[in-house]
Image (cartoon, grey):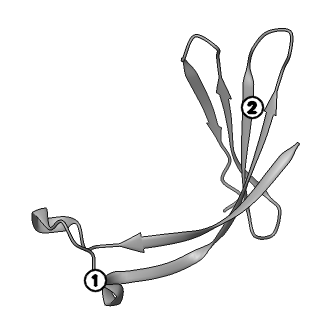
Amino acid sequence: MQEMLFEVIKSNGLKNGKNVIKSEELQLEGKTKISFEEDEIDGVKIVLNKDENNNVREIKFICSCGQTKSIILDYGE
């Protein structure tokens, strides 16, 4: 399984129809790991989105026909 690490950034800069985001309008919210796995038989790709603590936050199934289904996990109480 191939895994990549990304930083999650939040911006309020695109409100009001702006085309440019200034650095002071960005907030670093954390990091996420994204893993890809493909089933050779059925042609289904599985994408796992994990937080920096390696907890799975989302499981996305992508069919070879282009349809997708997602399961979002919330560990909050």
Question: Which residue extends farthest bottom?
Answer: 24
The residue that disc 1 covers is 22
Q: What residue type is labelled 2?
A: Ile
Is 16 drawn above or below residue 65 in the view shown? below
In front: label 2 or label 1: 1
Badge 1 marks a residue whose secondary structure is loop
Q: Do the residues labelled 2 and 1 touch (CB within 8 Å)?
A: no
> Residue at the location (66% across, 53% down)?
74
Query: Could you tell me which quadrant the C terminus lies in?
Result: bottom right
Circle 2 residues within 10 Å: few <14, some 14–19, many ≥20: some
Is 56 drawn above or below residue 72 in the view shown? below
> Residue at the location (54% across, 17% down)?
66
Circle 1 residues within 10 Å: few <14, some 14–19, many ≥20: few
Indicate left or right for 44 with 8 as reference: right
Indicate left or right for 44 with 65 as reference: right
Q: Quadrant of residue 36?
A: top right
Front in this rendered view, residue 13 or 59: 13
